[in-house]
Image: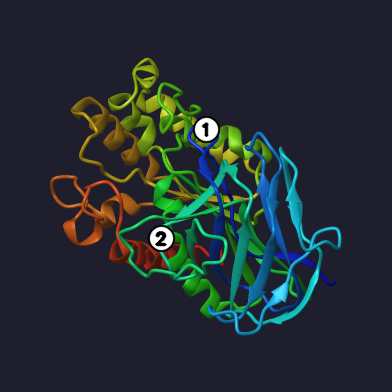
Amino acid sequence: MIAWQPALIQTCDDFSAMPFKLGQLSQLVKYTSFLSGNKIRLVLSNLYGKEDLYFDKVVVSKDAKFHVKHQVTYLKRPQIIVPKGQKIQTDPLNLEIKAGEVLYIWLTSSKEQTYADVASSYATTLLNASYGRKVDYLPKLSSNSNRRKSWFSLDGILVWTKANPKVLEFGGDSLAEMGFVSQAFGALLLKAYPNQATYVNTAISGSRLLRDCPTDSPLLATYGLSLLKRQQNKMKADISIFFCGGNDLLLPNYSKQAQKQVVSAAELLAGFDKLVTACPNKVIFSTILPAPKIVPAAEKIRQAVNAELVSWPQVFDGASLVADSNNQLLPVYQLGDGLHLNQVGGEFLARKLWDFLNANSLL
C-alpha cells in the first residue's frame, strides 16, 4: 500500500527559553532519504514559538547550488505560514527520490521573527545544515565535526512510497542528538536495508531519563521533558535505541534545582525498567557512558547501575567499549571534553551496536 513514510526525521527542541531572534533568515538543510518514492512533503514545526512563523520561500533541489529547484507550497501558496503551537505538512511535491539520494532544502524569511523550534547536529553523514542572516544569501555547508550545526522549524521529510519500512528511533540525550552514533548507524542501515528501514532522531541534548529540565538557567531549560515523559507522546517506531541516564547524574553539578533531585541507583534502574515496559515497541539502550564531572558518589551509582544493566537482554554495553581502565572515555573516541563522543567514537560504537542488533535478530 502506498503511504507517507518518514524519509528522515530529526525533531526540533524547545528553545523558547533562549530563542533566536533574526531580522532575516536564509537556511540550508541537507537530508539523505532512506526511502524511494515519487512525492515528498516537508514537516515544519512551530510548537514552541509565541507567534506564527512566516517563510517567503521554501525550495527543494538535488544539488547544493540549486541549479534546478522545486517550489514547496502550503495550502497552494508559496509563502508558508506555520501557526504557533502547531506542526504542519506542506503540500505534496511531485519529485522522484531514491533511497540514499540527497535533497537540499532552502528556506528563507525576510520577516524579523523569533525561532524557538531548533534542531542541531554535529555529524554530517546523513544530515547537515547552515543558516545566514541575509535572505538572498545561500549558506554553505560545513563538514567540520567539531561544531554544532543548527537549523530552525524543520523536522524532516516524508516520502510517498510503496515501501513499508521498519522505523528505527534514536532518542535520549546528546549522545544521540549530536549524530555521531545515530548517523553512522543510519549509514550502515541505508547500505544494508534500502527501502526496508528508515530513521528518526528524537533526542534532546541535556535530557534526563527521570526528570524534566531544570529551569534555573535559560540553557538548562532547553533540555526538555524527561525521556520517560516524552515517551507518552512518542513518534511511532518499531525499535527505539536510547542513550540516557548520564545527565541524571551530571546535572546536580550545574543546577541548584537539580541538586535537590539527586538520584539513587534503585531510582535509575526503576526508570530504565519503566522505559522498557512503557514503550509498545522494542527498546534498546546503552549502559551509561563515563563523564569526567560525575562526582565520586554519582560515579559509584553509575557503575552499580551499569553492573545491573549488562544482565538485561535489551542493553547494549556501550560504556565498556569506549572507556579506559580509569573509567574515562578513551581520548581517541571523545570530542575533547571527556564527555561527548567524536566522529571516530560514534562510528566505532555504531558498528558495535549494529553487531549487537544483528546478533539479537532485531534488524
Residue for badge 1: 226
**Quarter placement of the N terminus:** bottom right
Left or right placement of residue 347 versus residue 5 in this view: left
Label 1 SS: loop
Tell me which corner region of the image, top left, top right, bottom left or bottom right, holds residue 154: bottom right
Location of the C terminus (image quadrant): bottom right
Residue lying farthest to the top in this orientation: 260
Amino acid type, label 2: Val
Q: Is residue 254 visible?
A: yes
- The residue shown at (54%, 80%) is 65
Q: Is residue 307 left or right of residue 79?
A: left
Looking at the image, is mark 2 or mark 1 earlier in the sequence?
Answer: 2
**Residue visible at 26% across and 44% down in the picture:** 290
> Where residue 137 sits: x, y (%)?
52, 67
Q: State how far apart marks 2 and 1 are (Cα).
A: 21 Å
Q: Name the residue beneath numbered marker 2.
A: 181
Q: Are marks 2 and 1 in contact (CB under 8 Å)?
A: no
In percent of width and height, residue 279 lies at 63, 42
Give the amino acid type for the residue marked by disc 1 in the picture.
Answer: Ser
